Image: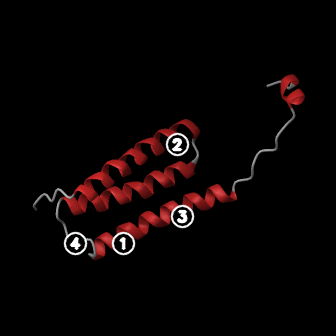
Amino acid sequence: MDLILDPLASTNLILALTVVVFGTLAYRASKDKTTLYLAAGFCLFAITDLLTIFGIGTRFDALHIITLISGYIAVVAALYLLWQKKPEPKRSFIKRLFSRK
């Protein structure tokens, strides 16, 4: 297993792991599963970058393709959940000012 220091794969790995960290932190703060799906999708993208860096298969290997497709499915599922969310009705300033919470 040889290390292949591909600058594109290395940059993608860093960016994907950054999204995973922030997605996980956002999930812990909001308990919204949408952010967890986004983090999972980008985690799968990071795995394909690690496979490239460690020289396991090629970019057109079945493992890479299946992992990428799974990542895209997770991201599309998160975007679908965002699309289906109902926006909260806006209350007027006066109602918010005098509401009891």
Label 4 is placed on what type of residue?
Answer: Thr
- Residue 66's mark? 1
**Mark 2 or mark 4: whose residue is earlier in sequence:** 2
- Residue 34 in percent (x, y) is at 56, 52
Q: Residue at x 15, y 59 (%)?
A: 4
User: Residue sitting at 17 percent across and 56 percent down?
Assistant: 5
CB of mark 2 within 8 Å of CB of mark 4? no
Q: Distance between the residues labelled 2 and 4?
A: 33 Å
Residue 32: percent from left, percent from top: 58, 46
Q: Nearer the viewer, residue 8 or 80?
A: 8
Residue type, label 1 = Ile
- How far is disc 1 from disc 3 in space, using C-alphas? 15 Å
**SS class, disc 2:** helix
Q: Residue at x 26, y 71 (%)?
A: 59
Whether tag 4 and tag 3 are in contact, CB under 8 A, the answer is no
Q: Nearer the viewer, mark 2 or mark 4?
A: 4
Colouring method of the image: secondary structure
Quarter of image, res 65: bottom left
Q: Which of 49 and 40 is in front in this view?
A: 49
Q: Mark 2 points at which residue?
A: 27
Q: Report, in whole angstroms, how far the alpha carbon at label 3 lies from the one at label 2.
A: 17 Å
Q: Is residue 85 left or right of residue 14?
A: right
Look at the numbered discs 1 and 4 and tell me whether their residues touch, using CB distance below 8 Å: no
How far across and how far down the image is residue 58, in percent? Answer: 22, 72
Q: Which mark is residue 76?
A: 3
Q: Is mark 4 on a helix, strand or loop?
A: loop
SS at mark 3 in the image: helix
Would residue 16 appear left or right of 29 to someone viewing this image? left
Residue that label 4 marks: 58
